[in-house]
Image (tube, helix red, strand yellow):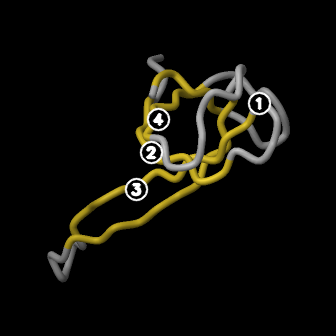
């Protein structure tokens, strides 16, 4: 099964080896036909602490690294 890859913006890098990535999803409302933007935050593993707040990154699914981390940063 292929791993999902998402693209988002780093919103926090306060913790060691962890970044919080905000991913935006756009979809059309089924009845009103209006474009809706919804966001979700993911905690991703960043081994070398290279990414800072505001960076655009790609994250991919991985095996659980901790209680909340199920994603890892692939590239900027």
Specify which label sits upstream in the sequence, 3 or 1. Answer: 1
- In the image, is residue 50 above or below residue 6? above
Distance (Cα) linking label 1 and label 2: 17 Å
Residue labelled with disc 1: 17
Instruction: Measuring from the top left, give residue 68's x and y in whole percent.
Output: 78, 43
Residue labelled with disc 3: 24
Residue labelled with disc 4: 57
Specify which label sits upstream in the sequence, 4 or 3. Answer: 3
Instruction: Measuring from the top left, give residue 43's x and y in whole percent.
Output: 67, 43
SS type, badge 1: loop
Q: Name the front one of labels 3 and 1.
A: 1
Name the residue rendered at 41%, 66% in the picture: 38
Specify which label sits upstream in the sequence, 4 or 2. Answer: 2
Residue labelled with disc 2: 8
Q: Are marks 2 and 3 in contact (CB under 8 Å)?
A: yes
SS type, badge 2: strand
Q: Are marks 4 and 2 in contact (CB under 8 Å)?
A: yes
Distance (Cα) linking label 4 and label 2: 6 Å
Q: Which mark is residue 27?
A: none
- In the image, is residue 68 above or below residue 17? below
Specify which label sits upstream in the sequence, 2 or 3. Answer: 2
Q: Name the front one of labels 4 and 3.
A: 4
Name the residue rendered at 64%, 47% in the picture: 20
Image quadrant where residue 70 sits: top right
SS type, badge 3: strand
Distance (Cα) linking label 3 and label 1: 23 Å
Crowding at label 4, few (<14), some or many (≥20) Cα neighbours within 10 Å? some
Specify which label sits upstream in the sequence, 1 or 2. Answer: 2
Distance (Cα) linking label 1 and label 4: 15 Å
């Amino acid at each position: 099964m292929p791993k999902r890859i998402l693209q988002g913006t780093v919103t926090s890098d306060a913790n060691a080896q962890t970044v919080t990535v905000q991913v935006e999803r756009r979809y059309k409302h089924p009845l009103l036909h209006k474009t809706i933007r919804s966001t979700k935050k993911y905690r991703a593993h960043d081994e070398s602490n290279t990414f800072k707040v505001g960076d655009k990154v790609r994250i991919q699914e991985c095996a659980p690294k901790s209680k909340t981390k199920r994603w890892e940063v692939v590239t900027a």
